[in-house]
Image (cartoon, grey):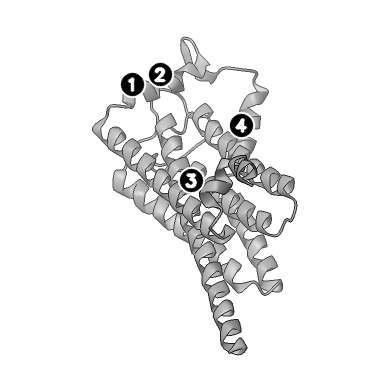
Amino acid sequence: MRESAGREPLYRRIFGTYAPSEIRIVFTVLFMTLGILIFLLITGIVVSGNTRQLDELVVTALREPGDYSKPVGPRALIGIMRDVTSLGGATFVTLTTVIVIIYLLLEKKRRSLMLVLLATLGGGMLETFLKSLIARQRPSAVFQLMPEYSHSFPSGHSMMSAVVYLSLAVLIARIQKRRVIRIYVIAVALFLTFIIGISRIYLGVHYPTDVLAGWALGLAWASFVWFLSWKLELRDKSGKDLIKDEEMK
């Protein structure tokens, strides 16, 4: 018996006494805390102006030497990057959210609906507030390959793609029984979030630190929504268990 206990995986020895819902809450709090800390760190460095040189170095490295109006790579790549970046734009994100909300209404999943609304509307308001507060100008060292008129920090496309796609991925993963499907769905959400952020840098509309801050804040906000979801689920389960105990008495 001792030998078999000693061979148990490390995560089982650490979390073996906790319910899966409790473990999920712990990890969401960790992700939320990590996202907030990274965002605050990047924000502090950006406000101090210490990232400007590195930011411009990365942005100009993606342009032809001597002509910063032309990006590196084949001309078709510009169109591809514009298509990719639209996946994190307000129009596509709004349409996706509306479609999901209608589905949740038809399925009468009110709690999931409220969480989706909190994720998207709350995330959008937070992004708008921070852009106005920090008021960082967009890159001027290179020609922007698509028009943008709002402030630069944090990247709204990067943040909202993280919020929306990761939140939806978790909702989908929760109803999947096979682990490989759950992993695949979350991996797709992470991939979309990543390439959307990269497209913003390539198109010259954001500095790398804008994108990194957007990812971090998006992770933190999505984790906050997940935390509420897991917490409510745990409360409901505890309430049902309490009712069962009372009935048995």
For disc 4, the marked residue is 81
Determine which of the numbered discs, if any, sits on residue 53 in the image.
1
Q: Report helix, strand or loop for mark 4.
A: helix
Q: Report helix, strand or loop for mark 2.
A: helix
Instruction: From this view, report whether residue 228 is shown above or below residue 242.
Output: above
Q: Marks 1 and 3, how far apart in space?
A: 23 Å
First along the sequence among labels 2 and 3? 2
Percent of width and height locating residue 63: 50, 17
* Image position of 27 (left or right of 152): right
Q: Marks 2 and 1, how far apart in space?
A: 6 Å
For disc 2, the marked residue is 57
First along the sequence among labels 2 and 4? 2
Please report contact status of discs 1 and 3: CB closer than 8 Å, yes or no.
no
Please report contact status of discs 2 and 1: CB closer than 8 Å, yes or no.
yes
Three-letter amino acid code of the residue under disc 3:
Met
Percent of width and height locating residue 113: 59, 68
For disc 3, the marked residue is 159
Three-letter amino acid code of the residue under disc 2:
Leu
